[in-house]
Image: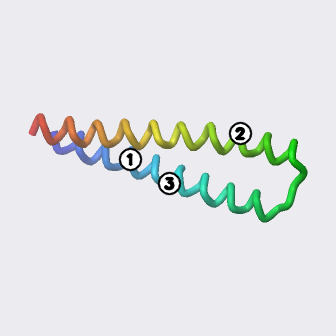
């Protein structure tokens, strides 16, 4: 079950990396000074990636907890 813990940790780290990407992406968008329709379209992409990253992190943490329980 130790493998399950490490796999879960890797999945969680991938989710956190995607969250960091979202933060950097939005900071760059705000600095770009785009018109509102373009900004809104690009922000929607960031929101979708953000929700996916949160889901991936949650699944990874679930795997870690499952691995700890089964150990």
Q: On residue 17, which mark appears?
A: 3
Residue 53: image x %, image y %?
Answer: 51, 42
Query: Which element carries disc 2, helix, strand or loop?
Result: helix
Would residue 2 appear left or right of 16 to someone viewing this image? Answer: left
Visual colour scheme: rainbow
Which circle's residue, 2 or 1, is located before the other in the chain?
1
Q: Seen from this angle, which residue lies furthest bottom?
A: 31
Query: Which element carries disc 1, helix, strand or loop?
Result: helix
Packing grade of label 3 (10 A; few <14, some 14-19, many >=20) is: some
* Quarter of the image where one finds residue 23: bottom right
Q: On residue 12, which mark appears?
A: 1
Mark 3 vs mark 2, CA separation in Å: 19 Å
Mark 2 vs mark 1, CA separation in Å: 23 Å
Mark 1 vs mark 3, CA separation in Å: 9 Å
Packing grade of label 1 (10 A; few <14, some 14-19, many >=20) is: many
Q: Residue at x 57, y 43 (%)?
A: 50
Q: Seen from this angle, which residue lies furthest front?
A: 36
Would residue 39 appear left or right of 59 to someone viewing this image? Answer: right
List the residue tagged with mark 2. 44
* Quarter of the image where one finds residue 24: bottom right
Which circle's residue, 1 or 3, is located before the other in the chain?
1
Query: Which element carries disc 3, helix, strand or loop?
Result: helix
Q: Residue at x 16, y 39 (%)?
A: 1
Q: Is residue 25 above or below residue 43?
A: below
Residue 68: image x %, image y %?
Answer: 15, 42
């Amino acid at each position: 079950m130790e493998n399950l813990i490490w796999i879960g940790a890797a999945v969680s780290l991938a989710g956190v990396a995607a969250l960091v990407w979202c933060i950097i992406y939005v900071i760059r968008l705000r600095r770009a000074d785009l018109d509102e329709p373009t900004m809104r379209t690009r922000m929607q992409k960031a929101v979708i990636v953000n929700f996916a990253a949160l889901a991936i992190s949650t699944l990874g943490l679930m795997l870690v907890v499952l691995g700890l329980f089964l150990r």
